[in-house]
Image (tube, rainbow, N blue to C red):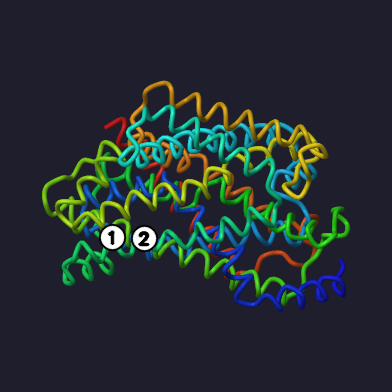
């Protein structure tokens, strides 16, 4: 493998230092806190209060593990996730996983567009489907007309807006004792409602679209540096992988930090005032205003809108990456529309389907939570496959997983499978 070239590239990347960490890592972390995740966390905080805050620190090591494995796969193999599946696994497995991921991405993109529109509707009183259509057109234009580096820069600034949830939580004046207890002592209920929200939390923090985006982002960075073939991109130095660990840890810590404060904001306001059922994004933001003040309600709604502008393109482009790689079609945000027309057509079609789903009259906030549950069921088999791939020497050479990463990966897989299985059991009892 290209150790010398990898070392040279690594030194260039290290030169970016903090800039690199605030780029790749934070973008991925912020994309994980999409409107679906925010809706799920807000619902969890409203229904279960501070007693469910413990899910934030518990999910952090799992988030780091799965995103790092995805990043490592892209770096070492020189391929995006579905490119690797196509090259090394049977077609029946490729089509099965592809269908699950593309459907999940499209549903979540549709729910996120609906959640964004409901938040915008608080200030701009237009029909929600009309807002969805306008937002989708803006996002599609950005993806088609903007360069990869421009999109990265925009995403980086959008990620910072998630700090609005820290402000919203602090304005809510949470009770210190109950917050500390809920953060450190897990409280578990064995019923359908609790397990549904746990599966939704797992599904949104470990969303399948994040795996494909992370592996493809590594490939896109390599392409931007002039390495356009798989052979040129293969391999990564130990310095590269250490840098990646720092980036992923920073990004997932940021994501988890925001998750904690979203739960805390609704736990400290809606839950303690008996408003335990959130039906719409507008209700969540509006309900905060009389309790925590106008500023808290505004910050909550603004966070949904801004992160949606980051997350929806990640999902629609992620679906396009997956389809293009599965069928051997050229697909890269580094390519202009005329150079990869099919890739951009796929982005347009996925976006159009997501928009169309919003004309069916579903409840935006409920759809956000259910999209998390869908992701929760689709994530375990994909994570299992990533674990197998990153331990496959045909794909990774000598840079297969360490024992520590494997242990954490298998624990994460077992936790996700168990939560999903527990929810299924409650459906039949």
**197 to 68, vertically: above or below:** above
Taking depth in this image into account, of 205 and 187 the one nearest to the observer is 205
Taking depth in this image into account, of 316 and 153 the one nearest to the observer is 153
Total labels: the figure holds: 2
Q: Are the residues flagged by discs 1 and 2 in contact, CB closer than 8 Å?
A: yes
Could you say which disc has been placed on residue 168 in the image?
1
* Disc 2: CA contacts within 10 A as few (<14), some (14-19) or many (>=20): many
| Residue lying at the far top of the rendered structure | 360
**243 to 268, vertically: above or below:** below
Image coordinates of residue 339 in percent, x first then y, are 83, 39
| Residue lying at the far left of the rendered structure | 273
Can you tell which quarter of the image residue 143 is in? top right
Could you say which disc has been placed on residue 164 in the image?
2
Q: Which residue corresponds to the image point at 48% horizontal and 41% vertical from the top-left?
A: 375
Image coordinates of residue 390 in percent, x first then y, are 69, 58
Secondary structure of the residue carrying numbered label 2: helix
Residue 227 placement, left or right of 75? right
Q: Which residue corresponds to the image point at 60% horizontal and 31% vertical from the top-left?
A: 350
Can you tell which quarter of the image residue 340 is in? top right
Secondary structure of the residue carrying numbered label 1: helix
C-alpha separation, residue under disc 1 versus residue under disc 2: 6 Å
Q: Quadrant of the C terminus?
A: top left
Taking depth in this image into account, of 176 and 303 the one nearest to the observer is 303
Image coordinates of residue 2 in percent, x first then y, are 87, 68
Q: Which residue corresponds to the image point at 76% horizontal and 50% vertical from the top-left?
A: 334
* Disc 1: CA contacts within 10 A as few (<14), some (14-19) or many (>=20): many
């Amino acid at each position: 493998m290209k150790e010398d070239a990898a070392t040279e590239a690594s030194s260039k990347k290290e030169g970016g230092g903090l800039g690199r960490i605030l780029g790749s890592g934070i973008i991925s972390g912020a994309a994980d806190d999409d409107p679906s995740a925010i809706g799920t966390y807000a619902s969890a905080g409203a229904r279960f209060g501070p007693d469910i805050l413990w899910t934030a620190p518990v999910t952090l090591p799992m988030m780091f593990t799965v995103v790092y494995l995805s990043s490592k796969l892209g770096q070492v193999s020189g391929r995006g996730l579905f490119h690797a599946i196509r090259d090394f696994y049977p077609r029946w497995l490729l089509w099965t996983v592809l269908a699950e991921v593309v459907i999940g991405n499209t549903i979540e993109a549709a729910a996120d567009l609906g959640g964004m529109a409901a938040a915008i509707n608080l200030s701009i009183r237009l029909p929600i489907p009309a807002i969805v259509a306008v937002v989708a057109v803006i996002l599609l234009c950005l993806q088609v007309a903007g360069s990869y580096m421009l999109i990265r820069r925009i995403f980086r600034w959008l990620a910072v807006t998630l700090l609005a949830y820290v402000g919203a939580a602090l304005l809510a004046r949470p009770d210190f004792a109950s917050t500390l207890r809920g953060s450190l002592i897990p409280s578990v209920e064995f019923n359908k409602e609790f397990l549904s929200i746990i599966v939704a939390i797992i599904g949104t923090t470990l969303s399948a679209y994040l795996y494909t985006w992370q592996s493809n982002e590594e490939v896109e960075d390599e392409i931007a540096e002039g390495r356009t073939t798989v052979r040129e991109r293969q391999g990564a130095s130990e310095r590269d992988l250490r840098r990646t660990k720092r980036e992923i840890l920073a990004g997932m810590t940021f994501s988890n930090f925001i998750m904690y404060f979203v739960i805390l904001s609704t736990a400290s306001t809606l839950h303690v005032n008996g408003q335990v059922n959130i039906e719409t994004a507008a209700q969540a933001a509006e309900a905060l205003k009389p309790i925590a003040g106008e500023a808290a309600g505004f910050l909550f709604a603004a966070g949904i809108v801004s992160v949606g502008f980051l997350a929806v393109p990640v999902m629609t482009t992620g679906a396009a990456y997956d389809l293009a790689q599965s069928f051997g079609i050229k697909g890269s945000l580094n390519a202009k529309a005329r150079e990869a027309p099919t890739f951009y057509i796929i982005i347009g079609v996925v976006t159009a389907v997501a928009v169309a789903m919003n004309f069916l009259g579903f409840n935006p906030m409920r759809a956000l939570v259910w999209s998390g549950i869908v992701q929760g069921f689709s994530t375990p088999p994909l994570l299992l496959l990533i674990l197998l791939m990153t331990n496959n020497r045909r794909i990774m050479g000598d840079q297969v997983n360490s024992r520590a990463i494997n242990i954490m990966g298998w624990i994460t897989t077992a936790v996700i499978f168990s939560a999903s299985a527990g929810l299924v059991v409650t459906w039949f009892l």
